[in-house]
Amino acid sequence: MVSRVIPVDDFDLVIFGATGDLARRKILPGLYRRFRDGQMPPEARIIGAARTSQDADAFRAFVRGAIEEFTPPDKQDGDSLTAFLARLSYVAIDARGTEGWSDLAATMRPKVIQAFYFSVAPALFGDLAERLHGHNIARSDARIVVEKPFGHDLATAKALNATLAAHFDESQIYRIDHYLGKETVQNLMAIRFANILFEPLWNAQYVDHVQITVAEQVGVGGRGAYYDKSGAMRDMVQNHLMQLLCLTAMEPPSHFDPDAVRDEKLKVIRALDPVRPEDIVRGQYKAGEKTAAYLTDVEDAKSRTESFVAMKVHIANWRWNGTPFYLRTGKRMRARMSEIVIHFKEPPHSIFDEDAGTKPNVLSIRLQPDEGIDLSVTIKEPGPGGMRLVDVPLDMTFAEALGADAADVPDAYERLIMDVIRGNQTLFMRGDEVEAAWRWTDPIIEGWQGRNDRPVPYEAFSSGPEDALMLLHRDGRRWREVG
């Protein structure tokens, strides 16, 4: 099956921080792939903006190198790359000064879509917003894209929202979380709301529990200085896992439009119960055979920042009363894996003998590395040995089921940037969502800081601390294996 590519209207996209790592790895290669697939109009222009003093040709050489490194060879060709590079220009700019802003103003075209990607530190958001308006560059219909972190706590999130709101309307602000651009995350909504099969069962009466896991094999690497001030709770749970939780637990929206979807997600966040201290496990990875310990990576032998967190969460509403959601994320885990797993309850009565066994159904939604969905169903084990029940998977790996190579599925950034150009905010976070998530997160962090808790050490490339396994074992449940 070949995906249908819907072109977007003509636009000028300015990327602040265009020589940074995110632009090099994700944004610029993603834009090239959208151009090569015919989704970007040939007149569209991409303007790089950064402190680096260079001309347009030097920037094009930088972008060529990024595309050649981060785009598979069979997804690039000389003609399309040359045509794409011709769409690029560059402005050396001082985010906190006056240099370059008049040049940027002269570069922008009237009567085309304006989008400004803030691929910079949040501390610069206010400066960029102020200068875009002060130099009469951003029109009233312009769009800005801001990267996480959206604050460090509730107070800073409110301040950041107020800074952006001083210059842009909420309808112009696109807070990007790349997890929401993943094909499987959007298919979660399709599974729930486009099929009659699951939604009647999607509640506490039929669901025993839900597991959401985002596991990474890498350590903090070169992000040690940033990560040690953040930790797994701020870096992953407050945004990525929170969004996956909301999409899994939310009520059906009245329409598939931005505010209807985000209204329902907000209701989930506001319904979250406070988390008890005994329902939280924090960990720090130890040194592996060829890898350093967390404390070495961050160069602070006394750090109490967590590289792993697991918790049991309850949602106080009619749909989910009594059904726990187990969240888990960590670095230096056994495998790179992100998934949502719905464990359904066992049938209320079995007609088979005890020897047959019981096998509750499990729906697994894989976000990475192999996007897809599988549902375990119970059948009779083949053979003459009587009635014995076994699990078999109904597996739908997207690349196989849709007849497409995995590389043909657009990267999350590709999809989300095109949604910005279309003016579709459905997959972007609203300001009140961000603040509600921090309002729930802050007391959890303050609680373990007040108790002076230390993270539990865990083996590198494992499933995390033993205490996290016990979090489920004491409830008579088990984590799904990582890897």
Image: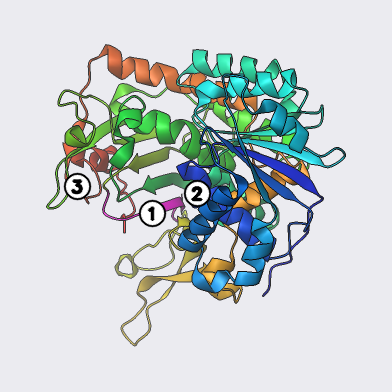
| Amino acid type at mark 2 | Arg
Does the rendering let one see residue 475? no
Look at 67% across and 18% down and name the residue there. Answer: 130
Q: Is residue 411 left or right of residue 452?
A: right
Most foreground residue, 63 or 304: 63
Tell me how many marks there are: 3
Residue 300 in view: yes
State the SS at label 1. strand
**Callout 3 crowding tier (Cα within 10 Å): few <14, some 14–19, many ≥20:** many
Contact, mark 3 vs mark 1 (Cβ under 8 Å): no
Residue extending furthest bottom? 384
Residue 333 in picture, x, y percent from top left: 27, 49
The part of the chain drawn in magenta is 333-346
Specify the amino acid type for callout 3: Ala
Which secondary structure lies at badge 2?
A: helix
Neighbour tally class for label 2: few under 14, some 14-19, many 20 plus, Cα within 10 Å: many
Residue hosting label 1: 337
Inter-mark Cα distance, 3 to 2? 29 Å
Label number found at residue 460? 3
Residue at numbered disc 2 = 24
